[in-house]
Each structure stands twice: as C-alpha cells, then as structure tokens.
Image (cartoon, rainbow, N blue to C red):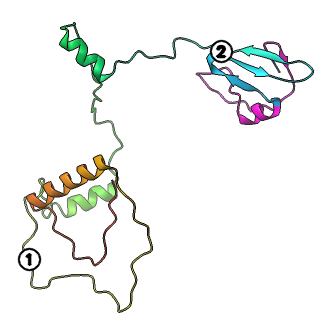
Amino acid sequence: MWEGTWEGKIDFMVAPVDDFKIILGMDFLRKVKVMPLPFLRSMVSPEEEMPCVVSIVTEGSSEIPLLSAMQVKKGLKNKQVTYMATRKEKEDGSGKPMPKVIKGVLEEFNDMMSPKLPKRLPPRRKENHKIELEPGAKPPAMGLYKMALPKLKELKRQLKKLLDAGFIQPSKAPYGAVVLF
C-alpha cells in the first residue's frame, strides 16, 4: 500500500463503507508508528529510513457554527434579527408491528385495562404488606454515592409530583431503594 510518500505492506480487511475510502485502525498506527496531527490535517511517520508527512484530505467543513446562549441573548437584546429552528421527529407509525402474543393478551384483558391511568392508588386492604427480614440479615453491600444536584432536584420533583397525585406511596422497605435515573 502507498499513501502520499509512504509505502509499505499491511494487512487489510475489505468492507463496503460509503463514507470513507480507507479506515486506518489502531493496528496500523502501532505497526507503522504513525502520529496523527489533526491541527495540521496530516499524519507523520517518523521512520528512520524514510520519515514522511501524509496530508489528510477532508471533505467539506467539519466545523459547525454554533451560538452560545449568551450570544443569542445578546443578539436578542440588541434587536438583531434572530431565527431559531428545532428538529421534530415525525411520528409516521412505521415502527415495529406489535407481536401477536402481546396483541392477544391485550385483547383478552381489554376489559381490565383502562385507556387512561387511574388518578390514585387502589384503596387500602386489610393486609398491610411489608418485607419481613430474617433476624441478623444484612443489607446488600453497595456503596452510597452522591447524586449530582440537578439530577437530585429533578428526582425530588418527580417523586413529589407522583406522591401528590397518589400514583405512588412511601416504601415500607427497611433499606433504601436504588433509583435508576
């Protein structure tokens, strides 16, 4: 193979790739001892016999001009003409069809499932269920960690909203529950 002034033997894997003519992986970089220099848009092969610099050709501009929130705010304040666009994914219903098994279960229990969520939890029963621990049982060994403040704030907001709506109730579990966020 040769690229620019570099010439050598390397192993290749042929694969149909639309976007690139060639992909040089880590094996190539280690074997040929190539150092990428992105600020010069080139690669350097510092071989003792024949060091060389290979230019990298990129198609189009890789930089997308973006404005910060401060720049937009300043532009609006100075009454500059401002356009804002957002992407909205169109829901065309072309998703995967529902499996027949699931469709059958939904049709079988159609009378038990309401189209809307209930506004509150079901009424309390005589039996107040809780998790009984065996004497001397230890909690699962898992280290605690601090949650980032914005995530903690959002978690508290969502839990309060669900508690106030009556969709959830405080846990009776003797140990803290893991929260996936």
Q: Is residue 48 visible?
A: yes
Counting residues from the start of the chain, the first of labels 2 and 1 encountered is 2
Q: What residue do we see at 24% from left, 12% from top? A: 75
Q: Is residue 75 left or right of residue 95?
A: left
Q: Which mark is residue 26?
A: none
Q: What residue do we see at 18% from left, 13% from top? A: 77
Q: Outermost residue toward the right?
A: 49
Q: Quadrant of the N terminus?
A: top right
Q: Disc 2 marks which amino acid? A: Leu
Q: Is residue 22 magenta?
A: yes
Q: Which mark is residue 40?
A: 2
Q: What residue do we see at 28% from left, 46% from top? A: 150
Q: Outermost residue toward the bottom?
A: 135
Q: Position of residue 124 (x, y in %)?
A: 8, 77
Residue 142 placement: quadrant? bottom left
- Under circle 1, the secondary element is loop
Give yes or no for contact between labels 2 and 1 (Cβ–Cβ under 8 Å): no
Q: Position of residue 11 (x, y in %)?
A: 81, 32
In this rendering, which labeled residue sits more in front, label 2 or label 1? Answer: 2
Q: Which residues are drawn in magenta?
A: 4-31
Q: Considering depth in this image, is 20 or 169 the residue closer to the camera? A: 169
> Can you identify the residue that label 1 sits on?
124
